[in-house]
Amino acid sequence: MRTLSLLLCAALLGLAAPQFRFRRPQRPRNFFRPQQNFRPQQNFRAQQNFRPQQNVVQNQGPPQQSGGLYYSWRDPAVGRNAKFSWGQANAACQRRNQRLVSLETAGKNQQIVGEIASDNIPYIWTSGQRTGQNSFQWASGQQVQPLNWSRTGGRGVPQPDNREGDENCLAILNRFYPGDQITWHDVSCHHKKPYICE
């Protein structure tokens, strides 16, 4: 009888025990637990499937590349194919304590045209900005002289033509339109291009 009563007590305790069992509170998964295989600087680019964004200006790169000029496409930190709006390019030059290139003389224009041709770059930004209907000014404050304006463009008319209605920045295009050479064009400032600082 005693065994039977012990078995009966054990059975009753077994049924009642789950109701009175003390459970330790569970913490959420990964609560203050570092991720496995996390290496902050080593895996960041791989984890993000990194590709440099073309509209983001990278760090400054090498100080000077040639005669005080900085060519964005020659900087390995930026990359040959990186392109920037005029505002992004201008800001990048300012961070270098420079400004976008001004082509105030025929000699300077020929130098830059030669670099564009030798590196086979399709287009670049200069510092030129529209100040009137057909007038532009370099970052130096000097008015742009008609040294190398193209005779054609998107409409087939001489530049500047303000074809898009907001073509307020001066770019150099490398044979972009049929029959054109490496010449100046007025372009909307949101377009993306490499740049030269001086």
Image (cartoon, rainbow, N blue to C red):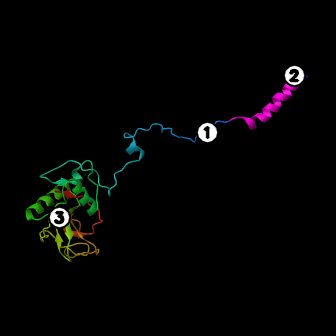
Question: Residue 136, position in %: x, y?
Answer: 18, 71
The quadrant of the picture occupied by the C terminus is bottom left
Return the x and y of residue 167 as percentages of the image width and height.
26, 71
Q: Which residue is mark 2?
A: 3
Pointer 1 with pointer 3, Cβ within 8 A = no
- Callout in the foreground (1, 3): 1
Residue 150 seen by the camera: no
Magenta includes 17? yes
Label whose residue precedes the other's in the sequence (2 or 1): 2
Q: Is 45 contained in the magenta span?
A: no
Q: Which residue is mark 1?
A: 26
Q: Secondary structure at mark 2?
A: helix
Q: Is residue 159 above or below residue 139?
A: below
Q: Secondary structure at mark 1?
A: loop
The N terminus is located in which quarter?
top right
Res 139 label: 3
Q: What residue is drawn where x is 23% and y is 54%?
A: 95
Q: Amino acid at mark 3?
A: Ala
**Residue 145: quadrant of the picture:** bottom left
Find residue 25 and report its horizontal and vertical position in percent: 63, 38
Which of marks 2 and 3 precedes in the sequence?
2
Give 93 or 21, whichever is nearer the viewer: 21
* 3D distance between C-alphas at marks 3 and 2: 103 Å
Residue 60 seen from this side: yes
The magenta span reads 5-22
Question: Which badge, 1 or 3, is on the more N-terminal residue?
Answer: 1
The crowding category of the residue bearing disc 1, from other C-alpha atoms within 10 Å (few below 14, some 14 to 19, many at least 20), is few
